[in-house]
Image: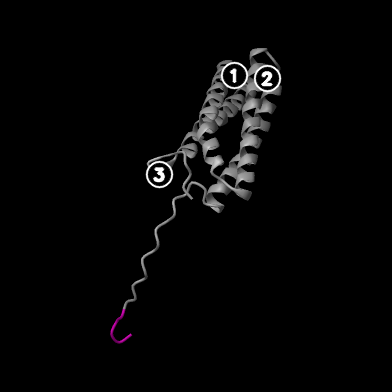
Amino acid sequence: MQTPANIARHPIHPMLVTIPIGLWVCSLVCDLVRASGSGNPNWAVVALYTMVGGIAGALVAAIPGFIDMLSLQGGLKRIALTHMAINLTVVALYAVNVWMRTQGREPNTTLWLSVLTIALLLVSGWLGGKMVYVHGVAVENPPEPAPAKTEHRAGV
């Protein structure tokens, strides 16, 4: 089922979500490296900037996602609304995390907040995958397969 937010029949939302997901996973990796005792304060700086970039990327990705959601009906719309609510919660938690870091909060507190937020992101990704892989949202109808050719061999 094709969705409205697409370019040349390629859905936009799945292309864009890779940006915030990648940046947020990178921020968690940076936090883990910092927590491991590397002693380099730049890991925390990179984690902060990747969080901010992830927030911006998520807000951009949300626009075509919202447009696509408006085209859904029934149970699919409920899944999409849950997916959206979790994603908005993730963005809000990352905004809180950024604020806490700029206020000089305890690094272990912000690390655990990042772990919690990535866990929520995994749940949201699972729901997004369910919409695509189970229900076919944003998947163009595949062409009908050609009829199988039967091979006739003499003497077999």
State the image coordinates of residue 80 (x, y, percent, origin top left).
60, 42
State the image coordinates of residue 30 (x, y, percent, origin top left).
57, 25
Residue identified by numbered label 1: 44
> How many numbered badges does the structure rendering display?
3
Query: Which is more foreground, mark 3 or mark 2?
Result: 3
Residue identified by numbered label 3: 9
Element under label 3? loop
Examine the image and state in which quarter residue 86 appears: top right
Mark 3 near mark 2, Cβ–Cβ under 8 Å?
no
Question: What's the CA distance linking mark 1 and mark 3?
Answer: 40 Å
- Vertical comparison of 98 with 142: above or below: above
Sort mark 1 into few (<14), some (14-19) or many (20+) by Cα contacts within 10 Å.
many
Amino acid type of the residue tagged 2 in the rendering = Pro
Element under label 1? helix
Sequence-first tag of 3 and 2: 3
- Vertical comparison of 80 with 59: above or below: below
Mark 2 near mark 1, Cβ–Cβ under 8 Å?
yes
Please report the residue visible at 61 percent of the width from the left and 36 percent of the height from the top.
84
Q: Which residues are magenta?
A: 152-156
Question: What's the CA distance linking mark 2 and mark 1?
Answer: 8 Å
